[in-house]
Every structure is written in structure tokens, then in C-alpha cells.
Image: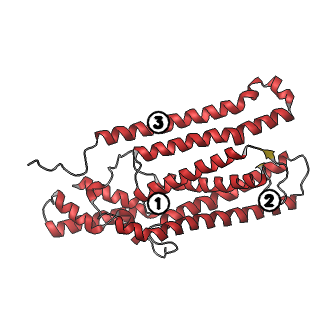
């Protein structure tokens, strides 16, 4: 029964901050063993272990009890929200600074250093504010519906805990990172829709040089990214990928890769060729660079996601059911 206890403690740890995880897991493991020893003395049976773990409750709720002063949207959702916000607060300034410097370097007209710094700072403040507001709004909506959802949640059953080597187990930090990147992508490409194309200047009233791109494909990309955000939120709440949910994620990734070809790779390569026609002679592969990039990303996605799908399908196919079969008769 040690394996079942380890599965439970492992799941609790997935919802804890990394710096506190090891200490809390060790403490929880000790408490569970002490409770079993006090109650059952000798080696407890499986039903006895299940009874004790059932009293401890859902892993994510137990993990939330270790987090103090976390009631912005509720203790169940707060760890997820703060992880996503931290990723965004770290990445947004880096992205804005990089795009701002790159825009100044490639711009045909000179921009005063002070003006460029002011524009970058303002763009950074606006981007972080919008990102934070969108993330909090998303989790506020989830929190609003949590009370109704909680009424339908079945009682916690420790036997349904995923195994330690389960390929369907959600990497919550990877999922949170994907959600953060997805929200930033939606905000960025929504701005491109508003100004009518790609630009490195984040000013709606004066976007600078705009590279026209097909708006339908911009909207398709936003739809694909939004779908992936929803799927990551879904699996974060349920703590496991299913074959069907991974297939949906897979399809959305392919749609996003196709949309990127039309809204990013092809327009940029076309502009480079148009501005520097001599490059096409010296670098013959440049005319096909957009297609090569799109194919490489699509193949990489197919291989990586395909391997995960096969592992998950084989695991689900060979794993025994969580409950022992009832005797016939």
C-alpha cells in the first residue's frame, strides 16, 4: 500500500511551490504513516489505506491548505493563476524590449533613444496590465462557476489517483507556461488584427510600417491559441490528459502552424525578397524559406505529439481498471 500513498503525496506535491514541495511531501508522508499506524497498528489493508486517504481529500484541496494568504480567486485556483502570472510578468518585458530594439534597428527612419525608451516602457506597462487583467478575469469566471461544478464532483477516491509513471499526468508548470504564452500571443495578434498587419511599433494611433497579412488567418491563429488555452485549463483542473483531449490539442497545434505560415513566415520572407531581390540569386533557398520553416515546425509537432499520443494510448490500453472487477453471480 506504500505505492498508493506515494501516488497521493506525489499528486499533492504537483500543486505546491517548488521550494516548499520536498519539505511538505515528507511531512505529509510521515503524517499519513503515523495515522495508519495509530489506527491499524500492523500493516494496513488496501481498504484501510483508501479510507485514510479519502479523509485527507482531493490532493489539490489539501495542497491549497498549505498556501496562506491566497484568496484572490480562491485557494483551489490561486496556485495556477499565480504561476501563469509570474511567467507573464517575466516574459512580457523581455519580449517587448527585444521587439522594441529590433524595431529601432530595422526601421528606415531614425528614432530618438529617449523616445524609443519611452515607447518601450509604455508598451511594457500596457501589455503587463492587459495580460494580468485577462488572466484574473479568466480565473474569476472559473471561480464563479466552481461552486456549481463542485456540487457535481464525485467523492474523492484514492484508487483513481494516476500512477507515478502515467504519461497522461499533466506537467502543471508546462501547462501554465503554455497558457501564459497563449494569452500573450492572443493579445499580440489581436493588436495586429486591429492595425491590419504585422508591425514592431505598439501604438494603435501610429503603428508605423505595417506589413499586410490575411486577416482570416490571423483570426484562425487566435482561435487555435484560444482553444489550446482552454484545453490546458481543462487538463489542469482534471490533472490528466486523455487521448481525446490530446488529439484536440494536436489538431489545434497543426491549425496554428498552418496559420503562422500565412500570417508570419510567408509575408516576412516575401518582404525580404522584395526589399533585397539580389539575395534570391545568392541564396536560392530563400524563396522557399517560408515553406521550409512551416514544414519543419509541422513535422516536429507531428513527431513530438505523436510519440506522446502513442504512449498515452498504450498506457490506457494496458492499464487495469482502478476498481477490481465485481465477482459474477
Which of the two discs, 2 and 3, labels the residue nearer the N terminus?
2
Q: Which residue is mark 3?
A: 306
Q: Residue at x 63, y 47 (%)?
A: 221
- Dot 3: within a 10 Å radius of its alpha carbon, few (fewer than 14), some, or many (20 or more) residues? some
Say which of 214 and 290 sits in front: 214
**Residue 307 point in image, percent of width and height:** 45, 36
User: Quadrant location of the N terminus?
Assistant: bottom left
Q: Residue at x 39, y 38 (%)?
A: 311
Quarter occupied by residue 255: top right
Q: Nearer the viewer, mark 2 or mark 3?
A: 2
- Picture layout, residue 145 above or below residue 270: below
Q: Which residue is mark 2?
A: 204
**Residue 48 point in image, percent of width and height:** 17, 62
Q: How many marks?
A: 3
Q: Residue at x 48, y 76 (%)?
A: 69
Quarter occupied by residue 22: bottom left
Q: Nearer the viewer, mark 1 or mark 3?
A: 3
- Per the model, the C-alpha gap separating discs 1 and 3 is 30 Å
Q: Is residue 54 left or right of residue 278?
A: left
- Residue 209 shows in the view: yes
Q: Which residue is mark 1?
A: 18
- Residue 177 shows in the view: no
Q: Residue at x 75, y 51 (%)?
A: 99
Helix, strand or loop for disc 2:
loop
Amino acid at each position: 500500500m506504500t505505492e498508493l500513498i506515494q501516488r497521493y503525496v506525489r499528486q499533492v506535491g504537483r500543486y505546491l511551490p517548488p521550494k516548499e514541495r520536498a519539505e511538505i511531501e515528507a511531512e505529509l508522508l510521515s503524517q499519513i504513516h503515523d495515522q495508519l499506524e495509530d489506527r491499524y497498528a500492523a500493516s494496513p489493508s488496501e481498504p484501510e489505506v483508501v479510507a485514510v486517504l479519502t479523509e485527507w481529500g482531493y490532493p489539490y484541496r489539501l495542497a491549497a491548505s498549505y498556501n496562506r494568504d491566497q484568496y484572490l480567486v480562491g485557494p483551489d485556483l490561486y496556485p495556477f493563476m499565480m504561476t501563469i502570472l509570474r511567467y507573464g510578468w517575466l516574459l512580457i518585458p523581455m519580449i517587448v524590449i527585444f521587439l522594441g530594439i529590433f524595431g529601432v534597428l530595422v526601421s528606415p527612419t531614425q528614432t530618438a533613444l529617449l523616445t524609443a525608451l519611452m515607447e518601450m516602457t509604455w508598451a511594457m506597462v500596457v501589455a503587463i496590465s492587459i495580460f494580468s487583467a485577462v488572466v484574473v478575469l479568466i480565473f474569476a469566471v472559473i471561480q464563479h462557476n466552481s461552486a456549481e461544478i463542485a456540487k457535481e464532483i464525485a467523492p474523492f477516491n484514492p484508487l483513481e489517483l494516476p500512477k507515478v509513471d502515467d504519461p497522461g499526468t499533466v506537467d502543471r508548470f508546462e501547462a501554465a507556461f503554455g497558457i501564459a504564452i497563449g494569452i500573450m500571443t492572443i493579445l499580440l495578434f489581436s493588436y495586429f488584427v486591429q492595425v491590419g498587419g504585422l508591425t514592431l511599433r505598439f501604438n494603435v494611433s501610429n503603428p508605423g510600417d505595417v506589413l499586410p497579412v490575411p486577416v482570416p488567418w490571423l483570426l484562425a491563429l487566435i482561435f487555435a491559441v484560444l482553444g489550446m488555452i482552454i484545453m490546458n485549463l481543462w487538463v489542469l483542473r482534471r490533472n490528466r490528459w486523455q487521448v481525446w483531449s490530446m488529439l484536440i490539442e494536436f489538431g489545434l497545434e497543426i491549425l496554428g502552424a498552418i496559420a503562422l505560415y500565412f500570417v508570419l513566415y510567408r509575408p516576412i520572407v516575401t518582404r525580404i525578397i522584395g526589399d533585397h531581390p539580389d539575395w534570391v540569386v545568392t541564396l536560392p533557398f530563400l524563396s522557399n524559406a517560408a515553406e521550409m520553416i512551416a514544414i519543419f515546425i509541422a513535422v516536429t509537432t507531428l513527431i513530438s505529439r505523436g510519440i506522446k499520443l502513442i504512449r498515452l494510448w498504450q498506457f490506457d490500453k494496458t492499464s487495469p481498471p482502478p476498481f477490481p472487477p465485481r465477482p459474477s453471480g
